Image (cartoon, helix red, strand yellow):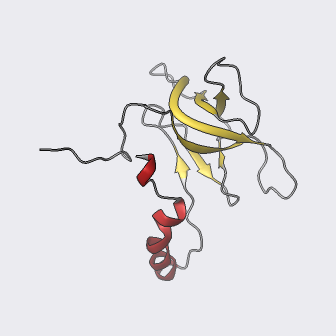
Amino acid sequence: MQAIAVSNGEQFGNIATGFFKRTGLSRIHNFHGTAEQVDSVFVEGNDGYLYPPNFADVIVRDPITWEEAPAGVPGVVQIRCAIPLSYSGHSILTEYLAVLHPADEPGCAYRGKRFSIIGRVPNAEMRGYSDTYATTA
């Protein structure tokens, strides 16, 4: 799947041009979320990074030690949220890889933790809405 992945620009490029002309809007914000924790949607800021809402957190963990990875070091995403009450979704270890970026850099319009999804754990089971593949008959 990684070999045929498209960037945000490729994904939204043609659609956005017509959308902007018809609506007068000037920006599409990407987001990241999981079906398992629908109350934690991480919206992309104008700087291209994803930001957790006030009631959730993202922890990037070293896949060998499971300690928190420092900013700039890729790792496995753990999502934590204070909202789930009807199920045990307050802490989920995902199959996504991400990198934390230093918070509060000069010129950044947003404050707090920010991150980028860089893909899925190698050899993770293919599933989800974005993973499609051809089967042989």
For this rendering, which residue is in front, 43 or 84?
Answer: 43
- Residue at (42%, 36%) from the top-left corner? 35
Q: Residue furthest left?
A: 137
Residue that appears at 49% across and 78% down: 17
71 versus 87 height, above or below: below
Q: Most extreme residue toward the bottom, as rendered?
A: 21
Residue 122, position as x, y percentages in the image: 48, 33
Q: Where is residue 79 drawn, in percent x and y?
A: 58, 30
Residue 118 in the image, given as x and y percentages of width and height? 58, 44
Q: Is residue 126 left or right of residue 53?
A: left
- In the shown orientation, is residue 129 left or right of residue 73? left
- In screen coordinates, is 76 left or right of 106? left
State the residue at coordinates (78%, 57%): 109
> Can you name the residue that lies furthest to the right here?
106
Residue 137 in the image: state x and y as whole percent.
11, 44
**Where 18 falls versus 4 (above or below)?**
below
Which quadrant of the structure image shows residue 83? Answer: top right
Question: 45 and 85: which one is in front?
Answer: 45
Whether 97 is drawn above or below 24: the answer is above
